[in-house]
Amino acid sequence: EVTRITKDTNRITLKHGPIQAMDMAGMTMVFQVKDPALLDKVKVGDKVKFTVLREGGAMFVEALEPAGAAPAAGGKLLEAPVDPHAAH
């Protein structure tokens, strides 16, 4: 669930359940977004699906859609982030 959007710093605060791929308990936390346009797709209070990417010790939201939305052009949105290194 989106609890805050801070467009001037390209950040979003999300309340999420456990993210097993990142060994993370459910919590509310602030994420940087890769593409600032993602912040225009949602509003505070929206339930969302998101994908997080870990780069250089930081976590970035790289995909974000309202929970009822269809994935973008051939993409796949997950409620739990995908660890791109997990399959290696």
Image (tube, helix red, strand yellow):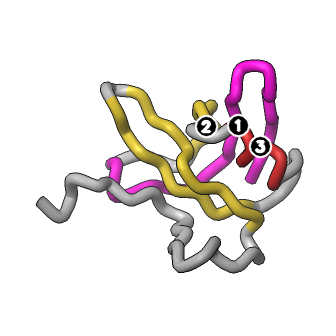
Query: Is disc 1 surrounded by few (<14), some (14 to 19) or many (20+) residues within 10 Å?
Result: some
Residue receiving disc 2: 33
Q: Quadrant of residue 66?
A: bottom right
3 to the left or right of 29: right
Query: Is disc 2 surrounded by few (<14), some (14 to 19) or many (20+) residues within 10 Å?
Result: many
* Residue 74 located within the stretch drawn in magenta: no
66 to the left or right of 32: right
Q: Quadrant of residue 50?
A: bottom right
Residue 12 percent across, percent down from the top left: 70, 36
Residue 34 percent across, percent down from the top left: 57, 38
Residue drawn 38% across the image and 59% down it: 82
57 to the left or right of 81: left
Secondary element at image label 1: helix
As measured in the structure, the alpha-carbon distance from the residue carrying label 1 to the one carrying label 2 is 6 Å
31 to the left or right of 6: left
As measured in the structure, the alpha-carbon distance from the residue carrying label 2 to the one carrying label 3 is 8 Å
Residue receiving disc 1: 36
As measured in the structure, the alpha-carbon distance from the residue carrying label 3 to the one carrying label 1 is 6 Å
Quarter of the C terminus within the rendering = bottom left
Secondary element at image label 2: strand
Secondary element at image label 3: helix
2 or 3: tag closer to the N-terminus: 2
For the record, the magenta segment spans 1-22
Q: Which mark is residue 44?
A: none
Foreground of the two, 60 or 23: 60
Q: Is mark 2 in CB contact (under 8 Å) with mark 3?
A: yes
Residue drawn 70% across the image and 28% down it: 10
Single out the residue that lies furthest toward the left. 88
